[in-house]
Each structure stands twice: as structure tokens, then as C-alpha cells.
Image (cartoon, rainbow, N blue to C red):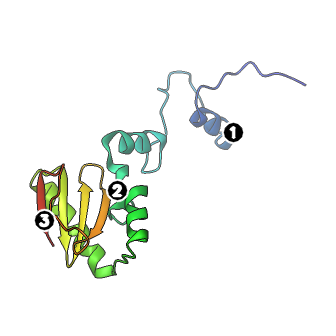
Amino acid sequence: MLMDDRQFFSIGQVQDQYLNPNTPKTGKEKESLPVGENSFASVLNKIQSGADNINSEGTVKFSKHAMNRLSLRNIELTQEQMQRLNQGKIEAGEKGIKDSLILIDQLAFIVNVPNNTVVTAMDQTENKSNVFTNIDGAVIA
């Protein structure tokens, strides 16, 4: 097997070498990294900025605990209630609320706004004391 003396430092260099073999190389070109919406650099920047915490539809996600609570309490959300929950999360974020109580119909959700995550959910009729802790704001949606 013959070994080649060329060294490649990025997939872009390999790609240029084998996909564009007729492009003359003078040796003075600046090495360029792939750019674009799905490039590694772009994806890394999104993750570091926290933009990837929002899924493709911009809807809140539910923690495992919240999913268990919804299941145990037989709570099923309609599309309209999900829209209101998302709108409530947006409004809480605009007011600088980090951990919000969002009330929708007879349902109560604790939402961690920066993480875009529903932490827990309950039916208001189940909560006898009507006391919610560890929140810094509430939204009635």
C-alpha cells in the first residue's frame, strides 16, 4: 500500500482535494472552514448560545418529572392549551421571570423559562393548599 505525504487538517481540505481536483493551488490560499446554517461552527454557536434549547417548533419541552405527573394525573393537553402554555412562557420571559407558574384553565404548570422546560404539572383541584413555591412570577394564560 502506498502512503501519501499529504496531510489534511480538516474535512474541508479533504473535500477540496478529492471533489475539486482541478482547482489550482498556489500554496498561498488561506485555509477556509465550511460555513452555512448546518456547518459545525454554526451548530456549535447555537448550542453555546442556548438557541438549541428550543425545539424546531419553538414549543416548551416537558421534563421527565412533568411527563410522569401528566400521566399520573391523567392530564391531556389540547393544541390550544399548548399554544397558550407557549405564549405564557414567552410572556414570562419578556418580564424576566425565570421560574414561572403558568395557569391555564384548571391546570397549573411550573416552567423554567431559561431552559424552556415544564418542570411539573398539576390539576388545580388537586392542590388543596393553593401554595406554589420556588417561583418568581405567574402568568394566567
Secondary structure of the residue carrying numbered label 3: strand
* Disc with the residue nearer the chain's start (3 vs 2): 2
Q: Nearer the viewer, residue 100 or 68?
A: 68
Do callouts 1 and 3 mark residues in contact (Cβ within 8 Å)? Answer: no
**Extreme residue in the left direction:** 95
The reply to whether residue 28 is visible in this rendering is: yes
Q: Are there few (<14), some (14-19), or many (20+) residues within 10 Å of tag 2?
A: some
Distance of label 3 from label 2 (alpha carbons): 20 Å
Residue at the (21%, 77%) spot, across then down? 106
Name the side, left or right, on which 4 lies relative to 141. right
Check disc 2 and report its element: helix, strand or loop. loop
The label shown at residue 54 is 2
Relative image position of residue 103 (x, y in whole percent): 18, 70
- Residue under numbered circle 3: 139
Of pointers 1 and 3, the one earlier in the residue sequence: 1
Going by the numbered disc 3, the residue's amino acid type is Val
* Residue 10 position (above or below residue 98): above
Compared to residue 8, the image places residue 112 above or below, namely: below
**Circle 2: residue type:** Ile
Q: Which residue is at 50% across, 21% downward?
A: 28
Residue 6 in the image: state x and y as whole percent.
70, 21
Instruction: Out of 105 and 122, give the one closest to the viewer.
Output: 122
Among the two numbered marks 1 and 2 on one chain, the one whose residue lies closer to the N terminus: 1
Looking at the rendered structure, the secondary structure element under dot 1 is helix
* Label 3 packing within 10 angstroms: few (<14), some (14-19), many (20+): some
Please identify the quarter of the rendering in which residue 94 is found. Answer: bottom left
Mark 1 vs mark 3: give the one in front. 3
> CA gap, disc 1 to disc 2?
37 Å
Residue assigned mark 1: 18
Q: Where does residue 127 sit, x and y in percent of width and height?
A: 22, 67
